[in-house]
Image: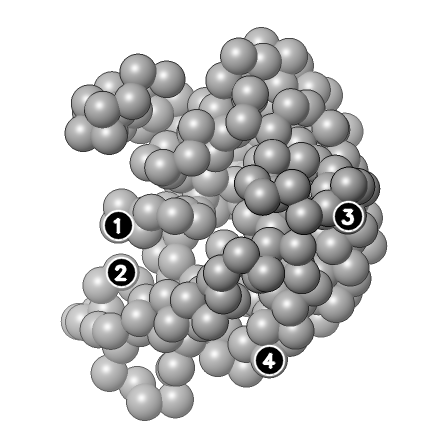
Amino acid sequence: MNHLFPPLLPKEALRPPVLAIAAHPDDEVIACGAMLAWHRRQGHAVRVVHCTDGDAGDPQGRYADIAARRQREGKEALHRLGVDDVLPLCLPDGGLPERLDDLTQRLRAELLRAAPRTLYSFFFTEAHRDHRAVARAVARCADVLAADCRVLLFGVNHVVCGGSMFDVTGLMDVKQHALAAFESQLVYHDWRSKVLGRDRAATVNVEDASVQHAELFCDLKPSELLPIANLVEPVFQRLLRDPV
């Protein structure tokens, strides 16, 4: 009997090519950075899409070049994970819901080009409106994904509902090194240490003492994306009291 909830699954079942879709440079490193590093260590092709350049991520105006700085930090963080294939879409930070059709069209084109067998992106219950817009856009594009594509949806600021997790204990040093690249964000608060704590907390029901950190996902088939989005989104928006 499997006493793990959610289940701890073997990483070896995941297949390339791998595509990760994030709203801002840092989302994917926070949520699945260790898994991206694992894929690269297996020799898997990994591509990351940043939908915005994160230019709203400087609320006190500390940097004159915040958009370029965040793009550089995002590329450096991914480089530390072994990932150098990065596509910036440069859509407006904070404004993705208003550009949902454009975002969907661009992501559809990228999914057709990349033809991923493993896809990482957001689950539908994220607090950030840009994250939810990306989740909705990806769900809209589900028809172009191969039926056997493994869709692993993550949370950045909310824990995903149910799902699966992967042991990343041996990959936390490289993930922490990657997170340290986000200097313009860490100057505001130390979410790097919070990410470490979150990945540790994911193993709360794992009895194997060797598993110290895990990354958690909602593990879906492409055909499940839109039906689940349509069920979850209205309820979550009501609970969040956010109309968008």
**Could you tell me which secondary element the residue under label 3 belongs to?**
helix
Q: Nearer the viewer, mark 2 or mark 4?
A: 4
The amino acid pointed to by label 2 is Pro
Q: Residue at x 54, y 82 (%)?
A: 170
Estimate how packed mark 3 is, as few (under 14), some (14 to 19) or many (20 or more) residues with alpha carbons within 10 Å. some
In terms of sequence position, does the residue under pointer 1 or pointer 2 come before the other?
Answer: 2
**Nearer the N terminus, badge 2 or badge 4?**
2
The amino acid at mark 3 is: Arg
Instruction: State the SS at label 4.
Output: helix
Identify which amino acid the numbered label 4 is placed on: Asp
Q: Residues within 10 Å of mark 2 (few under 14, many from 20)?
A: many
Q: In the drawing, what numbered circle is on residue 162? A: 1
Query: Who is closer to the viewer here, 96 or 167?
Result: 96
Per the rendering, the mark at residue 69 is 3
Q: CA distance from mark 2 to mark 4?
A: 24 Å
Indicate whether 134 appears above or below 37.
above
> Which residue lies under the disc numbered 2?
6
Residue 17: x and y, percent? Answer: 70, 48
Task: Note whether 98 is above or below 166 in the view shown.
Answer: above
Count residues near mark 4 (Cα–Cα under 10 Å), then give few for <14, some for 14-19, many for 20+: few
